[in-house]
Image (cartoon, helix red, strand yellow):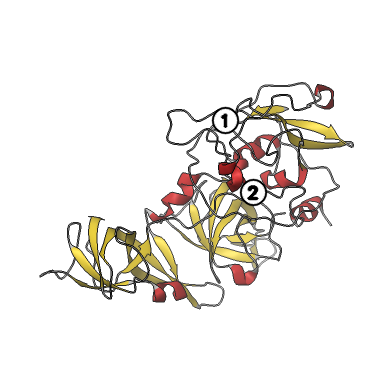
Amino acid sequence: MSLSKHCLNTSLWLITVTLAASLAGCGSNPSNSGYDPESTVSTTSSTRPQPVNTSSAAPTYEPKLTRVSEPVPLAEGHPNEYVVQVGDTLWDISAAFLKDPWYWPEIWYVNPQIENPHLIYPGDVLGLVTIDGQTRITNVRASTYRMSPQARVTPLTEAINSIPYEAVAAFLSSGVILEKGQAEKLPYLLDTRGDHLMASAGNEIYVRGITGDQPSTRYNVVHVGDPLVDPDDNRLIGYHGTLIGEGSLRRTGDPATVALTDSNREAVKGDRLLPATVDAPLNFFPRSPSSNIDGRIISVVDGVTQIGQYQVVVMNRGSNNGLSVGDVLSVFQAGEEIKDRFGGGKVRLPDEQAGTVMVFKTYDRISYGLVMEATDAIHIHDAVRNPI
């Protein structure tokens, strides 16, 4: 078995607390961590990833853990120490040390002398150490006081997220994909209040299907558009959605009354309502899927033709295929079919790897993924497969 396949099919080793627990881990930590300078290569300066906002609380995941025996490839020009910055993500830091960031959980070493050793906070010093002849990454020195909260919106004591919050939270701003079963169950616009055929900001609408929510609950109003068909079997798996605007629940009941507070086009009968919150976990560790995945990108949320880093894509594989949150997939450009002028006939060129996607939300037959790396242009219908 190859190194990548072996490493990526193993789960995390020794990490049993996920990053979301950080909100409860804001106490002080001694700066004396027992770090032995003799066990590392001499310190060099590091290139720090650009900060992003990390404010979010989300579900967490605890995969089973195993130990990996083969060496993990390090990034070219990697630092030997790195000071964690406000706004860093686990992926950013992983990429600073490792050639393939999703190897991070395989070589993380828990330093028992650090309070909450599984968590990574701004001000912590991470370093490469040698343990039993193998290179590991560990928290070699905790920030003395975990950088107590100051006059900021986001407390500096929060542990870092795995992926940028803004990239995931913004995926509703340009559109959304509705799974077939999901679209049929969402609350829908029954009628508008007053003498209006269509509704916009300032109008009230009557909605059926809202149950259990309290007044002032916010919703996104979405127009259900063209059907989304799986290119592999031509089955309907969902619909393209267009964000119409936002509203707030004014009065409960059946129908309920929702006041539209913002709109970019008119809402019409049959439009659906989605909760205005992003139901997606941000604290998890990257890993390879537990089953063999061979799917395709079928949509990109903001409708561009060439897909780049931190854009949200929709794939035609989901939990029914074994995908789960945190799974990492490689993207492959489909090889072009060309004419062989010398041997005759047509030849399809090999698929070429073009990037990396991390799954952050799954449904039965589709899943959302965030493009973490784009080494080449990524397009609709490019293949997504297990990392190699």
Q: Secondary structure at mark 2?
A: loop
Across and down, in percent, residue 251 comes to 25, 66
Q: Is residue 48 above or below residue 272?
A: above
Quarter of the N terminus within the rendering: bottom right
Residue designated by label 2: 18
Question: Does the rendering let one see residue 209?
Answer: yes
Q: Is residue 165 above or below residue 361?
A: above
Query: Is residue 332 left or right of 245 when viewed as pictured?
Result: right
**Near-viewer residue (230 or 36):** 36
Q: Is residue 185 left or right of residue 103?
A: left
**Residue, far left:** 195
Between 279 and 50, the one lying in front of the other is 279
Please state which amino acid type lies under the numbered disc 1.
Gln
| Mark positioned earlier in the residue sequence (2 or 1) | 2
Mark 1 element type: loop
Q: Which residue is under mark 1?
A: 85
Residue at image position (71%, 66%) is: 291
- For the point 68% across and 39% down, the residue is 116
- Residue sitting nearer the eye, 334 or 102: 102
